[in-house]
Image: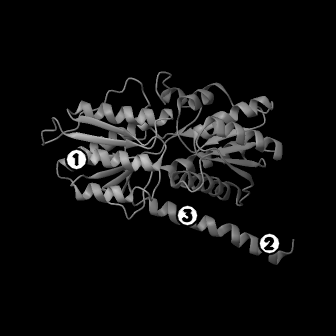
Amino acid sequence: MKTKNKTSVLKQCLKPLMVLALIFNLSSCVEQTGSTSATVNSAEDTGVTVASNVDLTGMKIGYCTPSLNAPYYQALLQSIKANTEKNGMVFLSADGQDDINKQVAAVEDLITKGVDALLLNPKDPDALVGVTRAAKAAGIPVFIIDSSINPSADYVTTIQSNNLANGELAGEWLVKKMGNKTMNIALLSGNAGNPVGRTRKQGLLQGITEEQLRTQGKIDLNVKTQAYTEWSYAGGLKAMEDILVAHPDINVVITESDVCVLGAIKAIAQAGKTDDILIVAGADGQKEAIKYIMDTDFYGCTAMNSPVQIGKNAVQYAIEYINGKRDFQKTSFTAPLLITKENAAKYYDPKALF
């Protein structure tokens, strides 16, 4: 390739990295909550009592989940329920059943029931804007949890794990592990356009490139393919089967979530490549993933996205709002944390839902 063409390609490669750096810098403006020793997704968690000057007895916290078809959603619901009831409040829940129209109707039902605070985990960032405005008109504060919503919505704050920082930690770890060894990377994503998945992916890629620049003085980012798994075990299995046929030289799999890759492990094992492929996840700290990290060498790391901690924070913020607090950051993150073989046992609970 001619030098002029090389320079042009380099400029094109650096443009998205500059955007990623800007996003990372802007993320420092949001609130970080929780400690660096993030809450274990424990089956024994029964909630915490939050100081309140208002009598909370009989007040209602409503929560609408996009679905209950995954352990993460179940664990998040149980955490919100436990923390709501620990503080003497009534817990009302609604299931969107993985259908946006049903989730809209479910939120409308919670509003009709007169909840004192609404916790909403949106299936779609745009389709639920209208119900947040309806809640505000009814005097009900809305807290977005786990996922994201269009900024035009009426809500107090978004409560989620720090997807960008977690992804960056995982990407840095990968480069340190691989050193100068050539990486042929397959990326397993959730679904197209998902804002949380996109941020996790940005974090992973930024972590890889920044660590390469810092330690090697160059960028060698060879993502050979991306596949969508629809955040499911079956989707991960099918995606990995196809990837191994089309790209037999893959030696690294990076993923936006543990659930995207747990099914892929079966395909990797069936192909006899568990000694040849290293897996790195930008989230979630699911117990099955942590067990693989503890027991094997092919699952390198994951980052903590604790439904237990997010549930605690969500109820705490709702109570603080009821007590008159209004100066919430627009996004509130739990503390980023990387889980590796060195600390995995600390965060593993075999009895946990997630």
* Amino acid marked by disc 2: Lys
Check disc 1 and report the residue beneath it: 320
Check disc 3 and report the residue beneath it: 21
Q: Residue at x 49, y 32 (%)?
A: 71
Whether residue 170 sits left or right of residue 244 in the image: it is left
Point out the tag, 2 or 1, that comes first from the N-terminus: 2
SS type, badge 1 = helix
Q: Residue at x 56, y 30 (%)?
A: 290
* Amino acid marked by disc 1: Glu
Q: Give the Cα separation between the discs numbered 2 and 1.
A: 55 Å
The 10 Å Cα crowd at callout 1, few under 14, some 14 to 19, many 20 or more, is some
Q: Give the Cα separation between the discs numbered 1 and 3.
A: 33 Å
- Foreground: 179 or 278? 278
Q: Give the Cα separation between the discs numbered 2 and 3.
A: 23 Å
105 over 24 or under it: above or below: above
Q: Residue at x 26, y 41 (%)?
A: 61
Badge 2 vs badge 3, beta-carbon distance below 8 Å: no
Percent of width and height locating residue 221: 72, 56
Check disc 2 and report the residue beneath it: 6
Badge 1 vs badge 3, beta-carbon distance below 8 Å: no
Percent of width and height locating residue 350: 50, 22
